[in-house]
Every structure is written in structure tokens, then in C-alpha cells.
Image: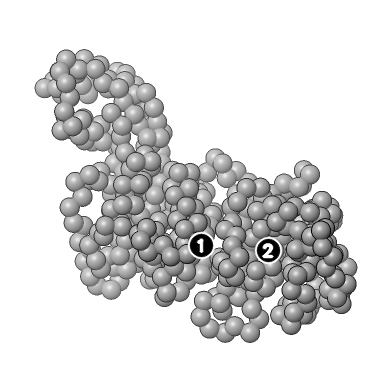
Amino acid sequence: MLKVIAIVGRENVGKSTLFNRLVGGRPAITHREPGITRDRNIKEIELFGTKALLVDTGGYLPYESRGIKAKVKEQVDISIESADLIIFMVDAKSGLTPPDSEFANRLRKLNKKVILVINKVDTKKSYGVSEFQSLGFKKIASISAIHGLGLNELVDYIKQEIETETEIETGIETGIETEENLPKFVVIGRPNVGKSTYINALLKEPRMIVDEHPGTTIDSIDVTLNYEGRELILIDTPGVRRRTKVKSDAEFYSSVRTKRSISKCDVGILLVDAGVPLTHQDKRILSMLIKEGKGIVIVPNKIDIGIEFREGVLNFARFIPITYISALKEDKIYEPIKEGFRIWSARKLRISKKKLRELTEMRTKLRITSMVQIGVEPPEFKIKSMQKLTPQDKRFIERELRAEFGFQGTPIRV
């Protein structure tokens, strides 16, 4: 099992910036506004041939006992307990603070390997870092995560620590050694429809922070789920807001991340509120998934409140299956996953020319002379006909293809 490295520290010391540096790219949102990272973000990294799992965490506030910040603290606590190596970050510009000292005391009692990382040490200026030596950690690295300074020394420390550690069970949900080959299901929807509650129910652990206030999730988080012996990547996303309601930079970048998650997924699990009809925003998300050619399952959540979901008129999305769940009561929560696997497999199907010819021979009214499949994910077909096909004709062909070959839940391009 891969070693787990957790980056911890108080708010706004640069944890997500370092996480992005070590992973490569920008998998975590970074912003000068404190408190942006809330859920745990886990990615596999490779440092000079040594692989490990890197965990980004929210800002630790030791005295928070209620509200969203207390739930962030709970997520940090889980990460610390699960980690083989802890990267404890502090801020050279603000100096040693009481929360830093409090956190250091707690880490020393855990008897775990810790690297103290003093961030925001710019070579152009001289910041006193000697005060941090009083925290009592042997391995200390001074870096500038935003500029990439001092990272070689830090990486050397990390490599030394995880190579000398003996293999132990960490208890953390991972299993992403073959992430590129696994099906990717994105859980998407408006704010506060229960996306994080649903993923926590699937994982059987409070991996995602759940709060009654809309907008709790602000970054896209990938986790791995094992369903009946088959692994898949679940992507939790921020609630998709109307453009007019995006009021901050963080919300804007969250919406960008959500769109990227749609682009890289295989199947979209669209959570909607079972107590209200499909909203304009729900239909907008559906349109995004269809335009990208992704598999789709519509999942009305909160059926435990006793209100029957009203499907409304979905002429443009009649091919999408609907499964009902209660994330809170964990009722039928695996049905969307089961349906997602069926759709994922159907999107890869290649239909032989013989079967397509047999289908067209039975549907003679369109005077189709040939039909061949020219693509998958989504399935794409090229048709030759002795007459010009209308949009209604194309929809008829799509319905026949779905009925004959099981393409329900995936767009078809004709």
C-alpha cells in the first residue's frame, strides 16, 4: 500500500500551493482568502521513483467546536491519524503564532514522522526562521511554494522518510494506482442537494464535509469507491450556480473546476431535489453533460421527506434513466452506481455492420442505404439515405438504436 503524506497547518499558510507544486498542475484551488480548502484532496505523486499519496487539508483551528470550521478540523484530524508522514506548514511572514505552537504540541504527542516546512521564505528578503526551531522538530525545510524555491531539499526529506518507513495499513480510502483506467463518475448538481452526503454514504465515512449551508464544497474532490469488486473514481463537485450568483473569485474557480470535472468524467450522476420540479439550473447541467457526450443518470435525492419527485417535461432528455435515493437514510444509494456502470459499458459498445444493416432493413420507411458506427464514448453513427433526414427522423433513429442495443443513458451522435 502506498504511503500517505498529509500537508497540515493553519489557514492560509500555503498548503494547497505546495500540494499543487508536488502533484503538478493545479488540482487544488488556491486563493488569498483563508479557508478555501475544506475537504481532503488526495492525489498520487511520484518523487524520484518513489510513489506516495499526498493529502491536502483545510486550515486547522484547534478551538473550533461548531459550524463549518469544526467540520474542517474533523477532516484534518482524520488525515493526521491516517498519515505515515506529516508536512507541518507555517508562515515565515507572519511568524510563530499561538495556533502554530498548539498544533505542534499535538503533533509531537502522536509519535509520527513530521517535517516542519517554513513557507513564504523569499530569497529577495530575509525572514527570521530561527523562532520556529523552538517547536522541536528535527527535519526543517525553508521554501517558497509559490515560487518553487527550496523544494528540492523538501523532496529529499520526504523521500528519506517514506523510504525508511515500514509498510503499515493506513485505513485511508485510496486505491488509485490505476486511476487513468478506472471509470470516472462525477456527482453534480445545484448547491445543497446532498452531493457530499451521498458520497459519504457510499464511502461509509465522513470524507466530505456536510453542512446545512449551501456552497460547503468549493473544490472538486476525487475519491475511490469499490462496488461489488469493481473500482471507480467518484468526483464530488461544488454546487453549480447561476452565473449571476457567482459573487467571489473562489466561486468562479469552483465553477471552472466543475466544468473540467464534467470534461474528464465518463458518467454524470445528476443529483436533484426530489421535493421540487427540475429547475432551470438542473436543465442547464443536463445540457452541459449532453453537449459533452457524457453518460447521465438523474438521481432525485431526499425522497425520505415524502414528496414525490415531479419529472416535468424533458423532451430533450427522455433517454436518461432516473433512480430515486435518500442519501441521508442511505436508501438505494448504490442504484445510481449500478446504472452508471451499465451506461459506462454501453458507451464503449461497437455495433457490427451486419447488425446495423439488419436494423435498417427493418426500418425501411426512411430509405436508409447504409449505417456504420464511426465512434464510441459517445456512440457515433454515419448514415446514408436516399432522402434528406429531418430532425424527427434522426430522433427516431436514435430511439431505435437505444431500444435495440441498450444505449439508454448516453447521448448518440448521428
* 214 to the left or right of 390: right
Picture residue at 48% right of the left edge, 48% below the top: 260
Q: Could you tell me residue 251's position as x and y percent?
A: 47, 62
* Mark 1 or mark 2, earlier in chain: 2
Disc 1 crowd, CA 10 A, few/some/many (<14, 14-19, 20+): some
Q: Could you tell me residue 101's position as x and y percent?
A: 77, 80
Quarter of image, res 358: top left
Q: Could you tell me residue 71's position as x and y percent?
A: 55, 75
Amino acid under disc 1: Ala
| View extreme (front): residue | 124
* 362 to the left or right of 192: left
Label count reads 2
Mark 2 lies on a secondary structure that is: loop
Q: Is residue 371 visible?
A: yes
- The answer to whether 328 is drawn above or below residue 226 in the figure is below
Disc 2 crowd, CA 10 A, few/some/many (<14, 14-19, 20+): many
- Residue behind mark 2: 14
Q: Is residue 323 visible?
A: no
Picture residue at 88% right of the left edge, 68% below the top: 138
Camera-side residue of 229 and 283: 283
- The answer to whether 112 is drawn above or below residue 186 in the figure is below
Q: Could you tell me residue 213's position as x and y percent?
A: 42, 74
Cα separation, mark 1 vs mark 2, equals: 16 Å
